[in-house]
Image: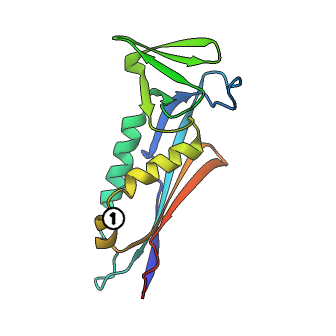
Amino acid sequence: MQTVTLELFKENMKFSAGHFTIFSATERERLHGHNFNVHVTIEAQILANGMCFDYGLYKRRIEALCRDWNEYFILPTRSPHLRIEESEDYLYAHFNQERIPFLRQDVLLLPIENATVEEFSRLFLEKLTEDPDELATWGLVAVSVKVFSGPGQCAACTWRKSPSVI
């Protein structure tokens, strides 16, 4: 089986977001933000027509995810050290005796343990690989997502097709 690796990291595959990283039950970073960049690598089978599949589908999905996450303050919903309290217009993050207020419209709650590039890359990957039938139809062998918080600093998560059982 001949495969090829496609790399997708266009200018609009980025999002700006605020966050803080939780280090322990009592220690966290101060509120700050980054211009995050997303780089996706796809390994797929080459078809008889000399191409893999219409990878524009993935470009559009990546761009849509970046738009969905852009210009929000990201809070994790699965942290054992953070409790989220929601009211009509406000959201409060409770951490170690602190009650941190946010306007509800400015916050994006994500199903992650911590607001880190590690978790962002994992969640991006889950969203891009959630349909096993689609992955098989397109002949995908591997998908890797890197999320950069700045030049030279990123985390990557990879999905690989399970080897066939004979």
Give 157 or 77, whichever is nearer the viewer. 77
Dividing the picture into quadrants, the one containing residue 32 is top right
* Residue at the image point whose x is 45% and y is 38% from the top: 111
Image quarter hosting the C terminus:
bottom left
Looking at the rendered structure, the number of numbered marks drawn on it comes to 1
- Relative to 29, is 35 on the left or the right? left
Compare residues 139 and 99 and report the one nearer the observer.
99
Q: Position of residue 163 (x, y in %)?
A: 46, 78
> Residue visible at 35% across and 57% down?
58
Residue 68 x, y percent position in the rendering: 36, 36
The foreground one among 149 and 112 is 112
Q: Quadrant of residue 25?
A: top right
Question: SS at mark 1?
Answer: helix
Rate crowding at label 1 as few (under 14), some (14 to 19) or many (20 or more) other CA atoms within 10 Å: few
Q: Is residue 125 above or below residue 103?
A: below
| Residue 10 shows in this picture | no
Relative to residue 43, is residue 28 drawn left or right?
right
The residue at 69%/30% (across/down) is: 24
User: Considering the image in quadrants, where does the N terminus appear?
Assistant: bottom left
Residue 69 pos. (x, y %) = 42, 35
Type of amino acid under label 1: Pro
Q: Is residue 78 above or below residue 73?
A: below
Residue bearing mark 1: 132
Which color scheme does this rendered protein use? rainbow
Q: Position of residue 21 (x, y in %)?
A: 63, 31
Residue at 71 percent across and 25 percent down: it is 27
* Residue 85 visible, this orientation: yes
